[in-house]
Image (spheres, grey):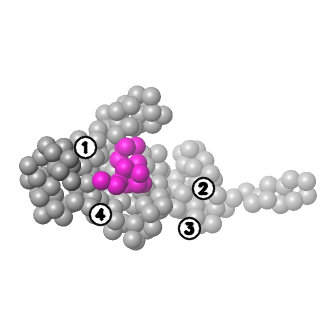
Amino acid sequence: RKERERSVKSCGCLLKKMREGGLMHLIHGLSKTRFYRIYKNIVDRCTNKNNHSFRRYGGKGVKCSWGTFEVFRDEMYFSYLKAIRIYGEKNTQIDRIDNGGNYSKENCRWVTAYTQTRNRRSNRWITYNGITLCAHDWAIKLGVHPKMIHERMGYGWPVERVLFQKPKEVRLKGQTIK
């Protein structure tokens, strides 16, 4: 015990402060967690030019506002725990509310994959009778293939025609396909 006491260089005030702040259990033990991997992936795609996603993040000026994992943890961990109770750990993802903005507490939230796919630059939004949905959701609502909606939009058709023109019947080897 005396050897251990002699090897410690701290006066103990940091340890006391961590205990008082209730963060003692969070200081160690997260490096092998999904939460830690999420943080590392954010940093990597914003800073590592060899990352396959760099061009869509760091290459476009997106930065990670959390200077260290500890800052990320202090700002996002409790909301992460709340989200995984609701969505489950595997279904919980971090999402930037404004895709042009940085990763920060103010611009990030925990969502499901479904919600995150609705927050992409590539989505094509259609408003009809005051209802705005992405093309994929309109296709689901109407019971048609999403590709049909996208193709019709590409042709420059008016919204009503894109959504409601009946598909043509196609005959292949004696079968009718709609």
Local secondary structure at mark 4:
helix
Indicate left or right for 125 with 47 as reference: right
Marks 4 and 2 sit apart, C-alpha to C-alpha, by 34 Å
Q: Earlier in the sequence, mark 2 or mark 1?
A: 1
Q: In the image shown, does 54 or 117 lie closer to the viewer?
A: 54
Dot 1 lies on which element?
loop
Q: Label 1: few (<14), some or many (≥20) within 10 Å?
A: few
Residue under label 2, please give it: 146
Q: Amino acid at mark 4?
A: Ser
Give the residue drawn at x 33%, y 68%.
Answer: 82
Q: Where's residue 4, x and y in %?
A: 21, 49
Tell me the chief SS of the magenta region: helix
Q: Looking at the figure, which quarter contains the N terminus?
A: bottom left
Q: CA distance from mark 4 to mark 1?
A: 18 Å
Question: Could you tell me which quadrant the C terminus lies in?
Answer: bottom right
Residue reaching furthest to the top? 49
Q: Find the residue positioned furthest to the right.
A: 174
Graded by Cα atoms within 10 Å as few (under 14), some (14 to 19) or many (20 or more), the crowding at tag 4 reads: some
| Secondary element at tag 3 | helix
The disc, 4 or 1, on the residue closer to the chain's N-terminal end is 1
Report, in whole angstroms, how far the alpha carbon at label 4 lies from the one at label 3.
32 Å
Q: Earlier in the sequence, mark 4 or mark 3?
A: 4
Whether residue 1 can be seen here = yes
Question: Which of these two is toward me, 48 or 173?
Answer: 48
Would residue 97 be seen by someone viewing this image from the given angle? no
Residue 145: image location, x then y, percent:
64, 58
Identity of the residue furthest to the bottom in this view:
86
| Extent of the magenta region | 28-42
* Residue located beneath label 3 in the image: 141
